[in-house]
Image: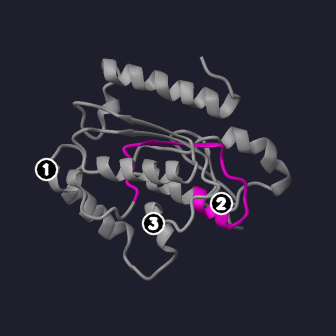
Amino acid sequence: MKKQYGIHPEFKLLSVIRPPLKREKMPRMQKMMGLLFDRQHSDRRVMVEKLMAIDRGLPVPCAQLLTYPAVGNCGETESLRLYTDTPMCNTEDMNTYGEWYVQDESAGKLAYRSPIEAESFAGIPMTYIETAEFDCLRDGAILYAEKLRENGIPVELYNTKGTVHGYDMMLRSGIVKDLIEKRIRFLEKALCGRTR
């Protein structure tokens, strides 16, 4: 029998990429699912899961938290041109990941390969995005935030300065401590409807 839901091993959060739990349990579960994220270039998966849930008429989690997301084909951005050899993630890496991720350009829906190219952003939940200054993904994430805002989606966008992809591994950094506090405030707003 096929699994009806997936649990990410690192964070133990429900994933809606497959049909989720029984529909009658979904209203209660929707807040609990809130955010879906992990650490290995999966922000694209998180965005795609929202689009798939919308397409399938399933409840959409109440928010998405994206740190330096790979949003798909944004064309030739300045950050892609500039950051070809930065640590952790660079343009060369992204070209390789793109070849792995999209092996058949004609397979599946374009928005599932490149969320920034979705025909509609209706139903996408409130979104939190962080970018790294010296990251080839920076400009794509900013463009995605702009597209969401143009479509009436509330977006919190934080463009970190002096950082590279993976900056949030430095937990003692003042930048990271500040961003963790911002993430917590976003989660409280998304899941509890309150702000500090």
Identity of the residue drawn at 72% across and 59% down = 58
Q: Quadrant of residue 106?
A: bottom left
Q: Are marks 1 and 3 in contact (CB under 8 Å)?
A: no
**Among the two numbered marks 2 and 1 on one chain, the one whose residue lies closer to the N terminus:** 2
Place of residue 165 in the rendered image (x, y in percent of width and height, measured from the top left): 28, 41
Colour pattern: one colour
Which of 22/28 is in front?
A: 28
Residue labelled with disc 3: 117
Is 154 above or below relative to 192?
below
Mark sitting on residue 39? none
Place of residue 74 in the rendered image (x, y in percent of width and height, measured from the top left): 34, 62
Q: Are marks 3 and 2 in contact (CB under 8 Å)?
A: no
Distance between mark 1 and mark 3 Cα atoms: 26 Å
Identity of the residue drawn at 69% across and 66% down = 56
Place of residue 71 in the rendered image (x, y in percent of width and height, measured from the top left): 40, 56
Q: Which residues are magenta?
A: 50-71
Q: Is residue 92 left or right of residue 41?
A: left
Q: Secondary structure at mark 3?
A: helix
- The residue type indicated by label 1 comes to Asp
Q: Residues within 10 Å of mark 1 (few under 14, many from 20)?
A: few
Identity of the residue drawn at 64% across and 40% down = 34
Residue labelled with disc 1: 85
**Among the two numbered marks 3 and 2 on one chain, the one whose residue lies closer to the N terminus:** 2
